[in-house]
Image (cartoon, rainbow, N blue to C red):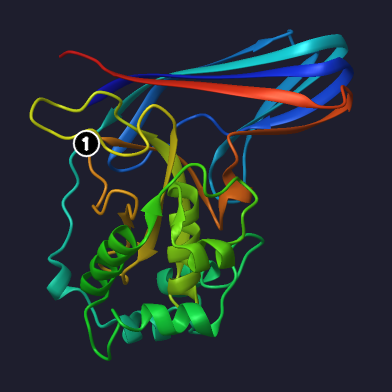
């Protein structure tokens, strides 16, 4: 599938801002199943300085600085992306989850131990016995890891209600777990807390969903906005495999990956600091348009 992406973020400040510095992670990644041959970032007011680098997780990160009084900031990311069908292993034929856990804890540097960097708690993802108890219902001894991950994904989808009013970007995982409600970011953080609590590497993925589904396909929750899901390391052969608890599926051609990290704090689409302003209002508009062949 080929897509044209537009992600527009607009800040309106209560007072004049004199200086602002920002980081944007809005460029889709190039992956075995995805390529982004074109990406542009339009910024108003025009920055006095800007640059691009790759962060420690391999995400393309843009920096820009604005000087001079301004009461609005508008950042528009435009991209052209191709997403290809990806074949995944039979879940029943993936290794036992304990063997993956143990391999990722090895002291010798391997592909598995490198993935193990994602098995620890992070700023927005705690680990604890309550999450361990919850996840072990789907991870009995010896169960193939992807089979268990698929089961956990389905249970989170069934037991947690999608409710945009239940949480905000700062809501802790403990509240989501207690109240059984949230949005895609919350469900991703919850699954990460569960998997990491039993020693499995899992990372947070940010991206988009196709806005208009193909004929006969249901529209997925989270379309028309940034979306979030997770990726679980399933062993040296299977590698990293994504799963979307908000929609109870393994992502395919309708999911577009932008960035990944330990949690949302590593992949926020746009963040920054300002001098002046006071309060601010933010609006976001996302458009994912399939391109006809």
Q: Split into 4 quadrants, where in the image is the C terminus?
A: top left
Could you tell whether 244 is left or right of 252 in the image? right
In the displayed structure, would residue 282 be above or below residue 103? Answer: above
Pinpoint residue 58: horizontal percent, then vertical percent: 53, 46
Q: How many marks?
A: 1
Outermost residue toward the bottom? 141
Q: Which quadrant holds residue 76?
A: top right
Question: Residue sitting at 23 percent across and 52 percent down?
Answer: 249
Instruction: Give 253 or 130, whichever is nearer the viewer.
Output: 130
Question: Residue sitting at 30 percent across and 25 percent down?
Answer: 211
Q: Residues within 10 Å of mark 1 (few under 14, many from 20)?
A: some
Q: Is residue 108 visible?
A: no
Element assignment for label 1: loop
Pinpoint residue 232: horizontal percent, then vertical percent: 37, 63
Question: Residue sitting at 29 percent across and 66 percent down?
Answer: 155
Question: Residue sitting at 25 percent across and 83 percent down?
Answer: 96
Pinpoint residue 290: horizontal percent, then vertical percent: 25, 19
Outermost residue toward the left? 216
Residue at mark 1: 84
Could you tell whether 88 is left or right of 162 in the image? left
Pinpoint residue 246: horizontal percent, then vertical percent: 34, 50
In the displayed structure, would residue 262 be above or below residue 214? Answer: below
Q: Which quadrant holds residue 223?
A: top left
Could you tell whether 107 is left or right of 34 in the image? right
Instruction: Give 161 or 96, whichever is nearer the viewer.
Output: 161
Instruction: Give 89 or 205, whichever is nearer the viewer.
Output: 205
Q: Is residue 91 visible?
A: yes
Instruction: Give 152 or 119, whichever is nearer the viewer.
Output: 152
Q: Split into 4 quadrants, where in the image is the N terminus?
A: top left
In the displayed structure, would residue 3 be above or below residue 179? Answer: above
């Amino acid at each position: 599938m080929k897509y044209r992406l537009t992600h527009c973020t607009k800040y309106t400040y209560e007072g004049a801002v004199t200086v602002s510095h920002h980081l944007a992670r809005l460029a889709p990644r190039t992956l075995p199943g995805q390529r982004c041959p074109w990406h542009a970032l339009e910024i108003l007011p025009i920055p006095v300085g800007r640059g691009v680098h790759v962060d420690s997780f391999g995400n393309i990160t843009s920096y820009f600085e604005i000087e001079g009084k301004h009461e609005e900031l508008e950042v528009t990311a435009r991209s052209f992306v191709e997403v290809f069908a990806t074949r995944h292993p039979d879940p029943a034929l993936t290794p036992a989850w304990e063997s993956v856990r143990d391999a990722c804890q090895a002291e010798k540097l391997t592909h598995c131990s490198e993935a193990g960097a994602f098995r620890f708690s992070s700023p927005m993802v705690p680990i604890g016995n309550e999450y361990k108890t919850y996840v072990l219902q789907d991870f009995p001894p010896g169960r193939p890891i992807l089979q268990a991950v698929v089961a956990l994904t389905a249970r989170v989808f069934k037991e947690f209600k999608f409710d945009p009013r239940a949480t905000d970007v700062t809501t802790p995982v403990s509240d989501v777990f207690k109240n059984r409600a949230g949005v895609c970011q919350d469900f991703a953080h919850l699954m990460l807390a569960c998997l990491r609590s039993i020693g499995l590497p899992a990372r947070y993925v940010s991206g988009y969903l196709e806005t208009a589904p193909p004929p006969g396909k249901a529209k997925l929750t989270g379309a028309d906005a940034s979306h979030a899901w997770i990726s679980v390391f399933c062993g040296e052969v299977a590698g990293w495999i994504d799963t979307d608890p908000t929609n109870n599926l393994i992502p395919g051609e309708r999911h577009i990956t932008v960035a990944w990290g330990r949690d949302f704090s590593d992949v926020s689409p746009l963040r920054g600091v300002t001098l002046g302003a006071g309060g601010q209002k933010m609006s976001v508009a996302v458009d994912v348009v399939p391109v006809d062949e």
